[in-house]
Image (cartoon, rainbow, N blue to C red):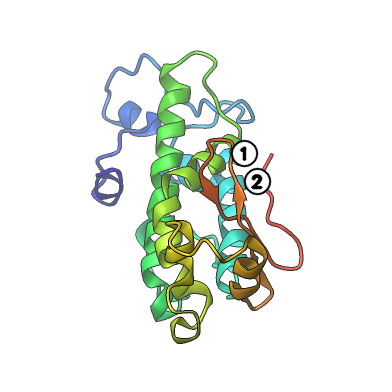
Amino acid sequence: MTVWRLLHGKLFVGAFTRHIHRSEPAGYTCPHPLCTQEEATLTHVFITCPLAASIWGWFAATWAAVTGEDPPPLSADLLLADDQRQWQPASQLTPLWHRLRLATICQLWASYQRARHQTGAAESAGVVAARLLSSCRKAILGDWRLATVNVRTTSGVLSDWLRGRDPKLTRVEFTARWCHRNVLCAVGEGPDAQLSIPWSAHHPVPLPA
């Protein structure tokens, strides 16, 4: 719904509400602490705000680490409107691209709304990125096989191991089987006792500050 409203000009950011002379108790400027009274336009909220820029930079680095492809260009046309005339993901990665891109847009919008309407609720890029990973964990795990390995040589190892169907498979063996283009899949217990998958190429892709 958020993305549909974005594409159809139905997201009422501060600058738009001012343009249509609509009262806005939360103000017309971006609520991010690093912004100096910048007008809250769609481009600013989703692309040029320091928070959004940091998130998309992390998004691009993570995409490159997970897929082994070059990072996508950080243009508004591609990230917001999915205009793929200048760049497009490999066909087998298209579902993963759409899910991660749309989840990022939704988390940026949710963060903007919280900061506008809740005193002291402005979030760091690291918090937003962590929430993004949590929100799309199932999508990432579901597409991991497509993004990283040859299905014929692994025969469903990921789903079987995550569901506990292969208790004899150790984490070391799991990690060894799930490597691709210098991308290491290391399995560990998260703080919520759920399995999580951090990725690394030559170096880990850390959450932004």
Give the quadrant of residue 61.
Answer: bottom right
Residue drawn at point x = 43 percent, y = 25 percent: 114
The residue depicted at 42 percent of the width and 50 percent of the height is: 136
In the picture of the structure, the residue carrying the numbered disc 1 is 126
How many numbered callouts?
A: 2
Q: Position of residue 77 (x, y in %)?
A: 42, 61
Q: Residue 207's mark?
A: 2
Of 60 and 154, nearer the camera is: 154
State the quadrant of the C terminus.
Answer: top right
Q: Quadrant of the N terminus?
A: top left
Is residue 20 shown left or right of residue 182? left
Q: Earlier in the sequence, mark 1 or mark 2?
A: 1
Categorize mark 2 by other alpha carbons within 10 Å: few (<14), some (14-19), many (20+): some
- Front position in the image: 64 or 56: 64
Separation of marks 1 and 2 at Cα, in angstroms: 5 Å
**Label at residue 191:** none
Note whether 191 is above or below 121 in the view shown: below
Q: Position of residue 2 (x, y in %)?
A: 29, 43
Viewer can see residue 168? yes
Q: Residue at x 50, y 39 (%)?
A: 131
Discs 1, 2 touching: Cβ within 8 Å: yes
The local crowd at label 1, few if under 14, some if 14 to 19, many if 20 or more residues have their Cα within 10 Å, is some
